[in-house]
Amino acid sequence: MPEPILSTTNLTVRFGGHVAVDHVTCAFNAGELTAIVGPNGAGKTTYFNLISGQIPASGGTVQLHGKDISGHPVSARTKAGIGRAFQLTNLFPDLSVLENVRLVVQAKAERGFNLWSMVSHHTDLTEQAENILQQVRLLEERNQTVSELSHGNQRKLEVALLIALDPAVYMFDEPTAGMSVDEAPIVLDLIAQLKAQGDRAILLVEHKMDVIRTLADRIIVLHNGALAADGAPAEVMASDVVQEAYMGRGLEGILADV
Amino acid sequence: MIRSLLSGDMPRSKFLGAILLVILICLAFAPFLFPGVRTVDTAARICIFVVLVASYDLLLGYGGIVSFAHTMFFGIGAYGVALSSTHLGRGFDSLIIGAGLGAILAAALALVIGLFSLRVRAIFFAMITLAVASAVAVLVSQISSVTGGEDGLTFKIPRELGPAFKFGKDLFGGELLGVKLNGKLLTYYLIFGGSLILFLTLLRIVNSPFGRVLQAIRENDFRAEAIGYRVVIYRVTATCLSAAVAALAGSLYAIWLRYVGPDTTLSMEIMIDILLMVVIGGMGTIYGAVIGATLFVLAQNYLQNLMSGLSSMTEGLPILPELFSPDRWLLWLGVLFILSVYFFPTGVVGRLRGQR
C-alpha cells in the first residue's frame, strides 16, 4: 500500500453543541478520485474547510505527505500542496480574467514580494496564465473583468485558478453547478485529465450521479458529520449502511432530491 | 523611458494624460510661471499633498485598508526634521537624519499597530489607528518641553535653503527670467524633486507584483489567502511602506514651512482632507492623488478669492452676493465635494479612464 498523499485522523469540529464533522478518519491516494457525497448539511463542505484550513479543527489532525499540517494557516497549506476550488464562485471580481490566473501563478512562483519590478516584465507568468486559460477555453475572455463574465465562465475560471495552483491535492466543490450542458464537459474533461496524470489526489463534492459514475474511483458517504460508508462506487451504492442511513431510499434517492 | 519611469502605468486616456502633463509642467516651473509668495507656496503644498494622498491611496485604494493615522505618520516625519534641526544644529545632515529616523519610526509604529490589529479584521485596524492617532496628537500637545506643545517648533534649515542665500550672480546676475535666484527657490526644487521621486516610487510599487497582490486582497482577502498569499503580511508591509512615505512627505512639509505644529501636521482636519482628496481624484489609482490634491489645494487657497470676485460681480442682485460671500467658502467646498462624488463616483481619474 503506497503512502497516501492526504489523510485525516479523527478530524472533528464542533459548533457549540453541534458536531458538524465527527471523527472522520480517511486517507486519499495519488491518482484516485474520491467523490464525497451525503445529504445537505452532512458536513461535506465543512470537511473541506477543515482540510484546507478555513475553519480550525476542534480535534484530530490533517496530514499531507505524512506531515501534520493541522496548525498551518490557509496560505501555508496552499503552498504545501492543498488546492481548493469553491462551491460559490469566489474570485477577484474587479480584476481581469487573466489577472486572476496570473495572481495564482505568481503566488506559486513566490514572487508576490517583488516590490520594484514591473508586472509587465514577468512575461513567463503571463504566458503560464494564458496557457491555463487556453485549457479551460477562456483565452478569448482574458481581458474582461470577472464581474462581466457569465456564470458558467466564472465557474470555469474557478477551476482554472485551481489548475494554476497545480497542487498535490485537488479539492472540487460541485465544480459544474450552474454550468450549461456545453460547458460542463470541458471542466469534467479537465478533471479526468488530472486524474489520468496519476500523481494527484482528487476530492470531489458532487450531487450529480452521472458525474460520480463516470469519474469516481471511490465514494465516501458523510452522514451527520460522520463517515457512513467508504468504498468502490458500486459497493457503496449497494451497501446496507447507506440504504439504512437514508431510510431505504438508497443513495440515488437522496441525491435525486438535491 | 517614460514607460519605465511610470512603471508601465500609462494614463490610458488622452485627456487625463494632458491634464497630468499640464500639472507637471505647472509644478516644475511654478516659481517662473507664477512668481509670488502665495502661488509658490500653493505649488509646494500641492507637491507634498500629492505624495501624502498617493501614500494613503496605497493603503485605501490598493490594500482596501482604512486608516485614520496617516496624519500621525505625516507628523512623525515633520517633527523628526524639526527636532533634529533644533538639537543637532541646522544643516543638511540634520535634515537627512531627521527625515530618516522619522520614516523608520513611522514604519516601526505601523508595524506594531498592523501586527496587533490587521491579523483579525481590517475594521479593527481603522479603530485602533483612530485611537493611536488621537493619543499621539494629545501627547504631542502635552509634552511641550520637547515638541513645543500647541505652539509647535520653529527651526532653522540650512543657510543654502534660506531666502538670504543668493547664487548665480556671475552667470545670470542673480536673476533668471525675473525670478531671484535664492535659497527659497532651491527649497522649492528640493520639495518638487523629493515629491516627484516619492511619487514615482509609489507608482512603481503599485504596479509591481506586490501591488497586484494588494489589489487581490482588496477584492477578496479570503481567496487571496486560499491561493497562497499570507494576507496579514502583505497588509502590514503595505501599512509600513505607506507610513514611511507619509513621514517623508511630512519631512518635506516641515522643511518648506520651517515650522511644525499640531495644526499643520497632526490634526484630524488634515486627515479628512486626505480622505476627500483620495475620493475626488479616484481610489485605486495613484494618478488620482495628483488630480485630487491639485483640485483640493487650489480650492482651499483660491476659492475665497474666486467667491469674493463673484460676490462683487453680482452686487445689486438679491441674495447672490450674500451667497457668494467669501466667508461661505466652506459651504461651496462642500457643495463641490458632493457634486464631484455624485458625478464621478469612481473619482475624476476613474471617470476619465472609463471613457477611453
Image (spheres, grey):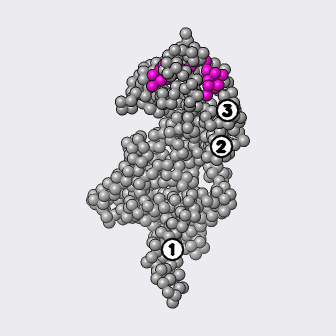
SS category of the residue bearing label 2? loop
At 66% from the left edge and 51% from the top edge, which residue is drawn? Answer: B3
Q: Quadrant of residue A169?
A: top right
Amino acid at dot 3: Ala
The crowd level at tag 2 (other Cα within 10 Å; few <14, some 14-19, many 20+) is few
Relative depth, front residue between A32 and B301: A32
Q: Which residues are magenta?
A: A206-228
Relative depth, front residue between B113 and A175: A175
Q: Which residue is mark 2?
A: A150
At 63% from the left edge and 60% from the top edge, which residue is drawn? Answer: B352
At 48% from the left edge and 39% from the top edge, which residue is drawn? Answer: B231
In the rendered image, residues at marks 2 and 3 fall on the same chain: yes
Amino acid at dot 2: Ser
Q: Is residue A163 magenta?
A: no
Q: Are marks 2 and 3 in contact (CB under 8 Å)?
A: no
- Left or right of B166? Residue A16 is left
x and y percentages locating residue B261 in the rendered image: 36, 63
Q: Is residue A207 magenta?
A: yes
- How many numbered discs sit on the rendered protein? 3
x and y percentages locating residue B304 in the rendered image: 48, 76
Amino acid at dot 1: Tyr
Relative depth, front residue between B113 and B344: B344
Mark nearer the N terminus (2 vs 3)? 2
Q: Identify the subunit bearing mark 1.
A: B
Q: Which mark is residue A138?
A: none
Measure the alpha-carbon separation of dots 2 and 3.
14 Å
- Left or right of B312? Residue B68 is left
x and y percentages locating residue A98 in the rendered image: 65, 41
Q: Which residue is mark 1?
A: B302
Q: Which residue is mark 3?
A: A184
Of the 4 image quadrants, the one containing the C terminus of chain B is bottom right
SS category of the residue bearing label 3? helix
